[in-house]
Amino acid sequence: MINGSKTITRPIRWAMVGGGEHSQIGYIHRSAALRDRNFELVAAALDIDPTRGRVFGEQLGIDPERCYPDYLSLFELEAQRHDGIEAVSIATPNGTHYAITHAALEAGLHVVCEKPLCFTLEQAEALRTLAQSKGRIVGLTYGYAGHQLIEQARAMIAAQALGEIRMVHMQFAHGFHSAPVEAQNQATQWRVDPRQAGPSYVLGDVGTHPLYLSKVMLPDLKIKRLMCSRQSFVASRAPLEDNAYTLMEYEGGAMGMVWSSAVNAGSMHGQKIRVIGARASLEWWDERPNQLTFEIQGQPAQILERGMGYLHPDALQDDRIGGGHPEGLFEAWSNLYRRFALAMNAADRGDAEALAALRYPDIDAGVEGVRWVERCVESANQDSTWVVY
């Protein structure tokens, strides 16, 4: 159980790029990073408006001299300090991720980046090569992977509790953009602009989340080929999709499906993953993250609750408040940031064994997310033909 004990000798000196006052995701980054005292927020370039960013930075308790107008100034001037930053989180629109991550790695910093890591597989591979050459950690914020029942599902599948895996059904299908809300919502506008969002909208924005959960649960399941159909039900979003269906064939014959959508009217979030085996199935739903459904053919369904002693030790390692009390997204993100800190610390110490023992959404997860989106777009643009993965 996580109880607040120190896991590293001192907090990592940390900065944010983006995540300003009106950011949708900035607060959860700060809450997760600061909760376990593994990070200390000492500098930032929070806003495209330097004055607004500085004012908000001061409200967060950052020294005004370390509230920078842009990320280049942040990296350059912090490198000149004896107490300069060691890591940075990037919470900016998708189109900026590659340049900022590249600059951060060149500056010798560890990185936590919003997904997608970048727009193209070529860019992603270049970032992976750079991170490896610099010995730096790159983490991706697939925050839902921090829920402890994801680890429980992984352990049960590995123990053959489901039998041979036949199907994996995934979805992240909310309804908040079932109308053209971007006309009034600036925070949504960039998500449907190809110049800032890249080659896809919902495939990269939501579809990669359950895809990563499937990789945690089923690490040996490899995609062989896929086919994708995508739609722009709000016509003004074309060529970007607001709905997509992706069918995948895995090596060995299992099948997978991902429904990615922002137009599932009435749905709050709609992220689910169901793994179906020859003997049993399990299902996790992010709106009810404290329960994992386990269904053995011919027997009553079981509901496994987080925090209970019957769970696998790997799941209980991520527990924070014991059984019965509900945990949610803030705890899941905090678990991931704790792992990011441990990985950064291990990399700084040159402890390859400790680093290899950690599991978190790393640079490889970022590369695979970009690869999947690229292949989906390729398939959809070829009239939904099968493409080799």
Image (cartoon, rainbow, N blue to C red):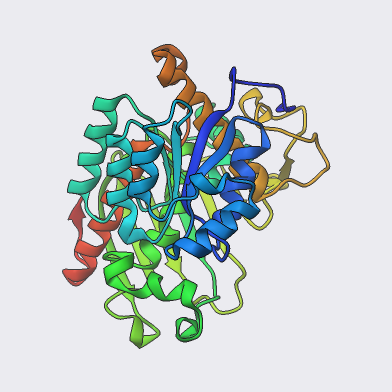
Indicate the position of residue 177 as horizontal and vertical percent values: 50, 78
Quadrant hosting residue 368: top left
- Image quadrant for the N terminus? top right
Instruction: Report whether residue 349 is seen.
Output: yes
Quadrant hosting residue 309: top right
* Vertical arrangement, residue 373 with respect to residue 353, above or below: below
Using the image as rendered, state which of residue 168 and residue 126 is in the foreground: 126
Instruction: Report whether residue 296 is seen.
Output: no
Question: What residue appears at the point 39 percent right and 31 percent down from the top-left corner?
Answer: 137
Indicate the position of residue 345 as horizontal and vertical percent values: 48, 21
Using the image as rendered, state which of residue 278 and residue 314 is in the foreground: 314
Quadrant hosting residue 109: top left
* Vertical arrangement, residue 122 with respect to residue 244, above or below: above
Q: Which residue is the extreme one toward the right? A: 324
Using the image as rendered, state which of residue 370 and residue 190 is in the foreground: 190
Indicate the position of residue 18 as horizontal and vertical percent values: 46, 55
Question: What residue appears at the point 23 percent right and 68 percent down from the top-left corner?
Answer: 380
Horizontal side, residue 130 vs residue 216: left or right = left
* Vertical arrangement, residue 239 with respect to residue 376, above or below: below
